[in-house]
Image (cartoon, helix red, strand yellow):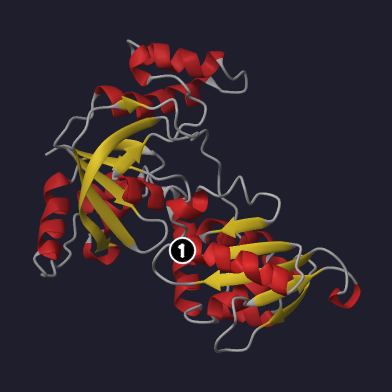
């Protein structure tokens, strides 16, 4: 059974849309043309270089090698693997539709295939390390070779059984060459943040980020928060502008429109100019569809934005945060274009 890895954005920013829409998307935001328009992979590569003078030939070849299969090689009945960037799980679906070019969709959802998700939230720890390495490769769309071993784990999970991991040294060696070291480090940081910020812990991290950005903050005590977890304001003693209401959700499910509407009301009650809605597990389509309308008043942060902001301001955070989430910078050799 042919198996394909499909990523929902570098940081999983499209994952909830994949699952809600029962589709996988080829998220190349610089490709507003049907992939079927290109009769060869070389033509597709040439398109990338012709339309962006900053794109190197090697990068264009890499992109074409990932985009081309989405329209020309994937077939109905084959398996799609979607590693989650939100939780430590992997989702599995079966392709049930041909390639579709949807120019009326918002960027980057032009290229799509319908999928039936038949096994969601399979724990990552159920799989051997070499399989996890292959799922952590740089490629956004590519073939997966360990089909039989992966499906054995998935079928055992669906039957409520736990399949014991085994060691496959040769496969591990092969997978090592394609490892995304930066991505793995980010995943480790994400897992540590999840482990250390259960309950109200995520609010402490968000407050630490805002303080590092120069805001004066007030964090609601544990208990009912009346729709606001953190108040943040610039200026001396926090009497200046902007004034921000922050609502933080650390649940395992994406946030829906009700929470967004609630934040809108709370902003008025607290005379805040802006709102920040934070959801570790992301947002449902009912929320993301409102992004443009809310652009001048509310910002949305998922786990991706949380980690980005946390790493960007880590050096300015107090010792309590650094003791809870101890990190160390390292330098590695840049092996070339992704």
Residue under the image location 25 percent in, 58 percent down? 120
Residue 313 versus residue 273: which sits nearer the camera? 273
Left or right of 287: which side holds 243? right
> Considering the image in quadrants, where does the N terminus appear?
top left
Residue 131 versus residue 169: which sits nearer the camera? 131
From the image, tell me which residue sits under label 1.
Answer: 255
Left or right of 298: which side holds 273? right
> Picture coordinates of residue 259 (x, y %)?
52, 67
> Picture coordinates of residue 203 (x, y %)?
59, 76
Left or right of 287: which side holds 65? left
Question: Can you tell which quarter of the image residue 272 is in?
Answer: bottom right
> Picture coordinates of residue 139 (x, y %)?
38, 38
In the depicted structure, whether residue 281 falls above or below residue 168: below
Residue 177 versus residue 38: which sits nearer the camera? 38
> Picture coordinates of residue 281 (x, y %)?
44, 63
Question: Can you tell which quarter of the image residue 88 is in?
Answer: bottom left
Label 1: which secondary element:
loop
Residue under the image location 63 percent in, 64 percent down? 264
What is the count of numbered marks? Answer: 1
Left or right of 184: which side holds 80? left
In the depicted structure, whether residue 293 falls above or below residue 244: above
Q: Is residue 220 visible?
A: yes
Residue 295 versus residue 76: which sits nearer the camera? 295
Residue under the image location 45 percent in, 32 percent down? 105
Question: Can you tell which quarter of the image residue 268 is in?
Answer: bottom right
């Amino acid at each position: 059974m042919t198996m394909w890895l499909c990523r929902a954005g570098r940081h999983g920013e499209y994952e909830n849309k994949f699952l809600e829409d029962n589709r996988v998307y080829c998220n190349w935001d610089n490709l507003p043309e049907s992939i079927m328009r290109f009769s060869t992979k070389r033509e597709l590569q040439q398109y990338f270089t012709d339309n962006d003078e900053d794109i190197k030939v090697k990068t264009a070849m890499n992109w074409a090698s990932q985009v081309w299969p989405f329209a020309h090689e994937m077939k109905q009945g084959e398996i799609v693997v979607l590693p989650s960037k939100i939780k430590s799980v992997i989702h599995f679906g079966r392709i049930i539709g041909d390639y579709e070019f949807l120019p009326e969709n918002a960027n980057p959802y032009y290229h799509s295939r319908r999928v039936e998700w038949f096994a969601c939230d399979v724990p990552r720890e159920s799989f051997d390390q070499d399989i996890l390495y292959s799922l952590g490769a740089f490629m956004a769309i590519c073939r997966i070779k360990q089909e039989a071993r992966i499906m054995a784990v998935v079928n055992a999970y669906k039957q409520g059984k736990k399949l014991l991991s085994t060691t496959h040294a040769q496969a591990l060696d092969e997978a090592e060459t394609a490892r995304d070291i930066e991505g793995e480090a980010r995943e480790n940081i994400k897992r540590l943040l999840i482990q250390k910020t259960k309950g109200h812990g995520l609010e402490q991290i968000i407050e630490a980020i805002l303080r590092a950005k120069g805001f004066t903050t007030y964090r609601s005590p544990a208990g009912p928060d009346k729709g606001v977890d953190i108040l943040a304001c610039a200026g001396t003693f926090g009497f200046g502008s902007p004034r921000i209401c922050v609502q933080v959700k650390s649940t395992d499910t994406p946030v829906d429109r009700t929470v967004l509407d609630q934040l809108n009301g709370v902003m008025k009650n607290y005379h805040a100019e802006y709102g920040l809605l934070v959801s570790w597990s992301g947002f449902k389509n009912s929320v993301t569809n409102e992004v443009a309308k809310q652009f001048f008043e509310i910002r949305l942060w998922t786990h991706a934005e949380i980690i980005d902001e946390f790493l960007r301001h880590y050096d300015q955070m107090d010792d309590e945060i650094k003791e809870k989430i101890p990190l160390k910078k390292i330098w590695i050799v840049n092996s070339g274009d992704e």
